[in-house]
Image: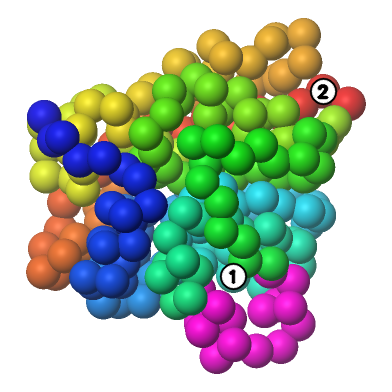
């Protein structure tokens, strides 16, 4: 198992080395051209509002949401990732870029505004903190009637070729996240594993298994 500490130093070094790619959809050096497929599938029917992208990396998903008229707060621990994201937003220009606020935060300790967002989105977050604490804080940030969307590495990839497959703390099932939510307050809409093909560093392709949890906070 990896002994990597997923702290700010780790992520600053990773993004400085090859531009990131820790979300599994952003091939290093590719600039993160494709949004996460689970995000596009699970938010297609949602009306745009305020969104929190928790662990935004170089901004692919935040900008995709902004292009669909979401007003996005995009946070990441690594200033180098945010610098790349800001540059990409400037290159994009237009009203979509203006709808994203980039913010450096450490998700191991940061507490987003309670009930502050219509969509809270977390994708492949690797943090040195108990995942239950993290997802409870993110769930608390969802407004009544809003959506929590968590995409993670399923345990089936633990011994595979996916990024961070050797670190067991990065893996979870959708049901583990669902179990953190009070059924009196939440309706679980999606809780499943999905397989997909992704391009990794060097141009090779691997099959990844995503844990996908989408839940709606009852109004």
Q: Is residue 132 left or right of residue 195?
A: right
Q: Is 89 inside the magenta-drawn segment?
A: yes
For the record, the magenta segment spans 85-100
Q: Residue placed at 60% from the left, 40% from the top?
A: 110
Residue 208 screen position, x and y as percent = 25, 43
Neighbour tally class for label 2: few under 14, some 14-19, many 20 plus, Cα within 10 Å: some
State the residue position of label 1: 63
Q: Vertically, is 197 above or below 137?
A: below
Q: Around disc 1, counting alpha carbons within 10 Å, would you say few (fewer than 14), some (14 to 19), or many (20 or more)? A: many
Which SS class for mark 1?
A: helix
Going 45% across and 25% down the picture, which residue do you hit? Answer: 131
Is 36 colored magenta in this rendering?
Answer: no
Secondary structure beneath disc 2? Answer: loop
Residue shown at 43%/23% (left/top)? 130
Q: Position of residue 162 (x, y in %)?
A: 19, 45
Q: Residue furthest right?
A: 219
Give how far apart the Cα atoms at labels 1 and 2 are.
27 Å
Locate residue 152, reporting x and y percent.
40, 36
Q: Is residue 134 visible?
A: yes
Magenta segment, principal secondary structure? Answer: helix
Q: Image height check: is 76 above or below 157?
A: below
> Which quadrant is the C terminus positioned in?
top right
- Image coordinates of residue 190 in percent, x first then y, are 56, 28
Residue located beneath label 2 in the image: 218
């Amino acid at each position: 198992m990896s002994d990597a500490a997923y702290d700010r130093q780790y992520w600053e070094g990773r993004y400085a080395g090859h531009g990131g790619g820790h979300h599994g959809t952003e091939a290093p050096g590719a600039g993160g051209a494709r949004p996460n497929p689970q995000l596009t599938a699970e938010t297609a029917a949602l009306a745009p509002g305020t969104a929190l992208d928790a662990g935004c990396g170089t901004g692919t998903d935040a900008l995709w949401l902004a292009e669909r008229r979401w007003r996005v707060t995009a946070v990441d621990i690594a200033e180098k990732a945010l610098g790349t994201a800001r540059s990409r937003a400037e290159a994009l220009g237009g009203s979509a870029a203006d709808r994203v606020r980039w913010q450096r935060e450490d998700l191991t300790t940061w507490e987003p505004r309670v009930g502050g967002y219509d969509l809270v989105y977390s994708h492949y977050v690797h943090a040195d903190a108990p995942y239950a604490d993290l997802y409870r804080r993110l769930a608390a940030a969802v407004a009544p009637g809003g959506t929590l969307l968590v995409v993670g590495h399923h345990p089936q990839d633990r011994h595979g070729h996916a990024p961070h497959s050797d670190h067991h703390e990065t893996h979870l099932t959708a049901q583990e996240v669902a179990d953190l939510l009070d059924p009196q307050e939440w309706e679980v809409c999606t809780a499943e594993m999905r397989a997909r093909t992704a391009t990794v560093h060097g141009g090779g392709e691997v099959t990844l298994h995503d844990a996908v949890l989408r839940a709606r906070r009852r109004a």
